[in-house]
Image (cartoon, grey):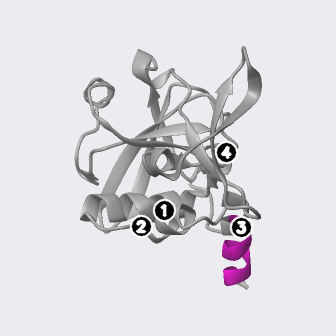
Amino acid sequence: MREAVTPKRVRRQPGQVVRVDLGQGLRSVALVLEEPLVAFYDRLFRSDDEISLEQIENLPVAFTIMVMNQAITKGVWPVIGRIDIPPALKAKPRFCKRDGMTGKVSVYQEIPELAPHFERPSTKEECERLEAAAVWEAEHVEDRLRDHFAGKPNKWVEQLRAGRSGYARVLTTLIDKF
């Protein structure tokens, strides 16, 4: 695990804009949503580019996923400001889940009126359009962003689409580190 960028712990708050450094003088930005969601903007910046909050509010979103809090609370992605969350990003996204034993797929979404963690059966075709229900680590998100901006497939996305659960991905990552 890499060192935190800031020495003190940061409190995660919806509306925070964070800078995601991608190496080689490149960076992106993301908007912290309701825990554990983060929306990543579809814009690549050079390290010497001025990043204004007004400019960020109008950027398209590349993807919205669940992210471990440590990326924000430990300062891995420094907070560069705060904006109002656009209405389009306030809706709870749907995610695809695949049962590791049966291979059956379902759609997962938080719908407080129905259940805190609502799931319903789904088809593989519907799931192909959705993000996998997994909580991402900062370094895997950074890999995904680099691949996204390079226009190439991302190994973590491909693994999740191939049916590996987010839990299995985290375990595999931990095993690979040792």
User: Label 1 sits on what residue type?
Assistant: Val
User: Label 3 sits on what residue type?
Assistant: Ala
- Mark 3 lies on residue: 168
User: Label 4 sits on what residue type?
Assistant: Asn
- Mark 2 lies on residue: 154
Name the residue rendered at 58%, 42% in the picture.
Answer: 122
As helix, strand or loop, the secondary structure at mark 1 comes to: helix
Q: Is 141 one of the magenta-colored residues?
A: no
User: Whole-Å distance between the Cαs marked 4 and 2?
Assistant: 22 Å
Q: Are marks 1 and 4 in contact (CB under 8 Å)?
A: no
Q: Earlier in the sequence, mark 2 or mark 3?
A: 2
- Mark 4 lies on residue: 69
User: Whole-Å distance between the Cαs marked 3 and 1?
Assistant: 13 Å
Q: Are marks 2 and 1 in contact (CB under 8 Å)?
A: yes
Q: Check the image and report above or below for 154 versus 117.
A: below
Q: Which residues are magenta?
A: 170-177
Whether residue 133 is visible here, answered yes or no, is no
Name the residue rendered at 56%, 57% in the picture.
Answer: 138
